Amino acid sequence: MRLHVIETGFFKLDGGAMFGVVPKSIWQKTNPADASNLCAWSMRCLLIEDGNKLILIDNGIGTKQSEKFLSYYYLHGDAELITSIRNAGFGEDDITDMFLTHLHFDHCGGGVRIYNGKPELTFKNAQYWSNADHWDWAIRPNAREHASFLKENLLPMQESDQLNFIDPSAPSPFTQFDIEYFSGHTEKMMVPKIKINGKTICYVADLLPSVGHIPLPYVMGYDTRPLITLEEKEKFLNDAVDNQYILFFEHDSVNECCTLKRTEKGIRLDRVFRLSEVFEN
């Protein structure tokens, strides 16, 4: 099994929204903001190559949104989803499975594109994976998340015969990774825990957007149930230290991976590194 980092570019979000109740005087030390209080965030995806399986985890924001919509998020950088997949040695038609941690637009927007003026699935040979609880939550969104669940991302999946739902009460349908479920950020977000070469690599999605979010109280204002996030995050952080998990970041604009350690102030960052360094020895 091999893992490929798939970069899809960067966008900007308000720093205060990303750190909730934590004051800017603290969070700006790890995530500096521009003059408009916006911080840069990556949309980093992961491609799992295993025999005849090619599993893509999340797919970024995509390119089909209107210029006005995209202007709100200041997309920048040279990386792009399909180009990054091709740079890894594959094409979009090679993807066998499109695994979506959750259905917010910056995680699933690249899974649908416009071709000849009509929407179509970007990965025509792939099975798309969500879970029924989260899907129901997304297609009937609450007012808080309404702007994050876009029908143009969801309806083409719903209308295809390629959408599959994972049962949270059953083992993972993938031999390549287990799945842990989190409902503080949004209902039943899925975090893949990939076992490779005796290590466990966790694609942490929006549970931990960046290394700046490791301290327990650092919870996004976007989370729908912040007190549940605190409970889920505390358990995960302890599990990560106890089991020596490697955390793979989707949104950290600088750091791909890290490990954690216990300190007198609680669980904190141990070291940061690129995913490729995990497999150098």
Image (tube, helix red, strand yellow):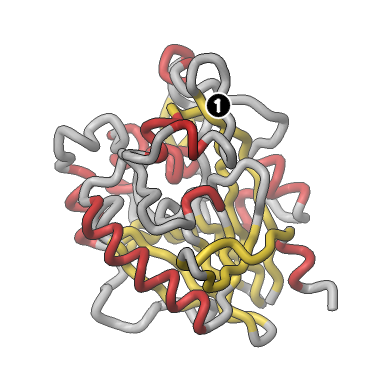
Quarter of the image containing the N terminus?
bottom right
Q: Given the current orientation, which residue lies at the most extreme front position?
A: 264
Q: Which residue in the protein does label 1 denote?
A: 33
Q: Given the current orientation, which residue lies at the most extreme bottom position?
A: 198
- Counting from the top left corner in percent of width and height, residue 178 is at 44, 78
| Quarter of the image where one finds residue 246 | bottom right
| Quarter of the image where one finds residue 195 | bottom right
Where is 67 relative to 180, above or below? above
| Quarter of the image where one finds residue 133 | bottom left
- Counting from the top left corner in percent of width and height, residue 248 is at 58, 60
Q: Residues within 10 Å of mark 1 (few under 14, many from 20)?
A: some
Judge by depth and name the residue closer to the eye, 225 or 46. Answer: 225
The residue that appears at 55% across and 26% down in the rendered structure is 33
- Counting from the top left corner in percent of width and height, residue 134 is at 24, 56
- Counting from the top left corner in percent of width and height, residue 61 is at 49, 36
The residue that appears at 71% across and 40% down in the rendered structure is 83
The residue that appears at 68% across and 55% down in the rendered structure is 5
Q: How many marks?
A: 1
The three-letter code of the residue at mark 1 reads Ala
Quarter of the image containing the C terminus?
bottom right
Q: Secondary structure at mark 1?
A: loop
The residue that appears at 62% across and 60% down in the rendered structure is 47
In the image, taking residue 266 as reference, residue 47 lies left or right, namely: right
Judge by depth and name the residue closer to the eye, 118 or 108. Answer: 108
Where is 257 relative to 17, above or below? below
Q: Given the current orientation, which residue lies at the most extreme right position?
A: 281
